[in-house]
Image (cartoon, helix red, strand yellow):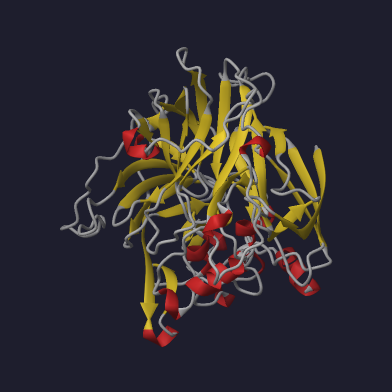
């Protein structure tokens, strides 16, 4: 058993040189990284010392079997932990779960202001992974806003945004970044201090023969691409430990918010110059300019005797010779057994809509339902008490679990990284329409609808978070074998914050009305509010 005692507060930090109020866990920003092994029991005593603000924690990628009430999804499995109160998260890691995960707040937009941390699950000692002899480096990379995320969401959710997503100000790696203070605008004064290269902590401790990079996109809106000067990169796993087959390249991307990939880094023999780790922010969802944002940034990769006087500008991404598209990867080995056919198909449509009767404000919809968390979590009440904002299809899956196909269509002009709680899925197909003028929706119930990409039954990726391409779709197959209420939502902060969320109610036939598995203790925190 691994025990942790966490106190959550706020404090002023300057991750990129600009002061901002952020969330702290035991005084740390970002929060602590948990390292455990498959099968471990995790007990975390959380003390909420925030002022007039609740919180919750979600364990991104863990399936939480038998621990649905510990999933941390406010409005679904729990109420937020009230200010001044404590809560104990107590759950077991699956014996077959290992890889790169992370934890983060699942209440409002706290994740965007730093309430997150790493979660690395190592395989059992007797079952070492093929790359366990590598130097292990965790990289939590994400976009960063200087405004509090609550203000960012308020702007986006207002009519003046016209549904255009906000554009970040900066980016950071493990809580560190840099902002050019000369780009400060008079209308938005900042308390800003330029960071010198000499004061930047190198990403890597040494030039090891073998280095494993655990890359997590902890951002709120932007995809990322990574490149290291003088080195090659090879993806070896995605999300929660799915081995992949891949070639070697100079750059890897695009990794969307919530996604993870493990990379093998190898140094080139003929490279002797100073090495920089380069991050490129994907601008697909940027509808408005932000002159202060440097979308391509370089960080010192290795300790150097003498660092350059100035930051090395990254190479133009288009000029990099070899790049690997993470969306085109496949599993390292064929599926162990032939995937059984799906006994059920659920069709989803994701769309941001602006409606006049809702004040011309953007709302995220899944199948014409815009989600709002109920004040009493769904887990603690029968289905007849769920309101009209809850789209949680019931999936009957008893002693013999069933396979379900999820066909998720994206009707928007930007991608939607979607995360499924409680389960992983096989990625059978992914299609993206070319340009901004085409459409790539798929409806198997419509004879006129065509599947644009063949289904991959031989070596599909296994993931828990996937980007639904703009004007495109994905076909996923899920073994639904984990009873409970599990969210499915966009991982872009402003999209989920305006309702782009749904989920599944998984249980035996007799639990269709959610009476058998109803858990009254899930609402215990509500009574403390």
Residue 288 figure quarter: bottom left
Quarter of the image with the N terminus is top right
Q: Position of residue 221 (x, y in %)?
A: 48, 56
Quadrant of the snapshot with the C terminus: bottom right
- In the current view of this chain or complex, which residue is farthest to the front? 309
Residue 319: percent from left, percent from top: 32, 34
Q: Quadrant of residue 439?
A: bottom left
Can you see residue 97? Answer: no
Residue 412, image x, y percentages: 33, 62
Along the line of sight, the residue nearer the viewer: 462 or 109:
109
Q: Residue at x 61, y 73 (%)?
A: 374
Say which of 509 and 162 sits in front: 162
In this picture, residue 506 sits left or right of residue 324: right
Q: Nearer the viewer, residue 289 or 86?
A: 289
430 or 510, nearer to the observer: 430
Judged from this view, the residue extending furthest toward the left is: 448
Q: How many marks?
A: 0
Residue 179 lies, in percent from the top left, at 57, 51
Q: Is residue 297 left or right of residue 14?
A: left
Up-down relation of residue 406 to residue 304 (above or below)? below
Q: Is residue 368 above or below residue 47?
A: below
> Can the viewer see residue 27 in this picture?
yes
- For this view, does 460 lie left or right of residue 516? left
Tell me the residue at 46%/26% (across/down): 233
């Amino acid at each position: 058993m691994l025990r942790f005692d966490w106190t959550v507060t706020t404090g002023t930090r300057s991750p990129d040189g600009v002061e901002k109020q952020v969330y702290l866990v035991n005084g740390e920003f970002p929060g602590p990284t948990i390292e455990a092994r498959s099968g471990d029991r995790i007990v975390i005593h959380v003390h909420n010392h925030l002022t007039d603000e609740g919180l919750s924690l979600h364990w991104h990628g863990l399936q939480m079997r038998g621990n649905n009430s510990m999933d941390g999804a406010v409005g679904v499995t729990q109420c937020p932990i009230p200010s001044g109160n404590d809560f104990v998260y107590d759950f077991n890691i699956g014996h077959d779960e290992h890889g790169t995960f992370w934890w983060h707040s699942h209440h409002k937009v706290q994740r965007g202001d730093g309430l997150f941390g790493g979660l690395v699950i190592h395989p059992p000692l007797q079952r070492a992974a093929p790359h366990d002899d590598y130097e292990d480096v965790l990289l939590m990379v994400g976009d960063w806003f200087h405004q509090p995320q609550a203000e960012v969401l308020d702007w986006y959710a207002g009519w003046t945004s016209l549904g255009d997503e906000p554009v970040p100000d900066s980016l950071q790696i493990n809580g560190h970044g840099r902002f050019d203070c000369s780009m400060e605008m008079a209308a938005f004064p900042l308390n800003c201090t330029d960071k010198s290269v000499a004061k930047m902590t190198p990403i890597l401790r040494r030039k090891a023969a073998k280095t494993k990079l655990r890359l997590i996109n902890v951002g709120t809106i932007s995809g990322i691409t990574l490149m290291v000067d003088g080195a090659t990169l090879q993806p070896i796993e995605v999300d929660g430990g799915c081995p992949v087959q891949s070639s070697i390249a100079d750059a890897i991307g695009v990794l969307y918010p919530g996604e993870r990939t493990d990379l093998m880094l190898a140094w080139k023999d003929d490279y002797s110059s100073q090495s920089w780790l380069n991050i490129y922010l994907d601008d697909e969802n940027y509808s408005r300019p932000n002159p202060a944002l440097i979308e391509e940034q370089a960080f010192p990769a290795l300790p150097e005797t003498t660092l350059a006087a100035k930051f090395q500008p990254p190479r133009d991404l288009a000029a990099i010779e070899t790049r690997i598209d993470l969306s085109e990867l496949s599993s390292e080995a064929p599926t162990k057994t032939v995937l059984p056919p799906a006994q059920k198909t659920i069709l989803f449509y994701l769309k941001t809509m602006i409606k006049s009767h809702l004040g011309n404000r953007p709302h995220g919809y899944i199948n014409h339902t815009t989600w709002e968390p109920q004040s009493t979590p769904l887990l603690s009440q029968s289905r007849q008490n769920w309101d009209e904002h809850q789209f949680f299809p019931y999936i009957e899956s008893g002693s013999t679990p069933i396979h379900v196909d999820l066909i998720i269509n994206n009707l928007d002009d930007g991608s939607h990284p979607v995360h499924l709680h409680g389960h992983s899925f096989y990625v059978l197909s992914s299609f993206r329409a070319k340009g901004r003028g085409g459409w790539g929706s798929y409806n198997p119930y419509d004879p006129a609808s065509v599947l644009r990409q063949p289904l991959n039954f031989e070596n599909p990726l296994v993931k828990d978070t996937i980007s639904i391409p703009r004007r495109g779709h994905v076909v996923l197959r899920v073994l639904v074998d984990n009873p409970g209420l599990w969210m499915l939502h966009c991982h872009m902060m402003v999209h989920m914050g305006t309702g782009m969320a749904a989920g599944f109610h998984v249980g035996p036939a007799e639990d269709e009305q959610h009476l058998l598995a109803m858990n009254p203790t899930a609402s215990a925190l509500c009574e403390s509010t």
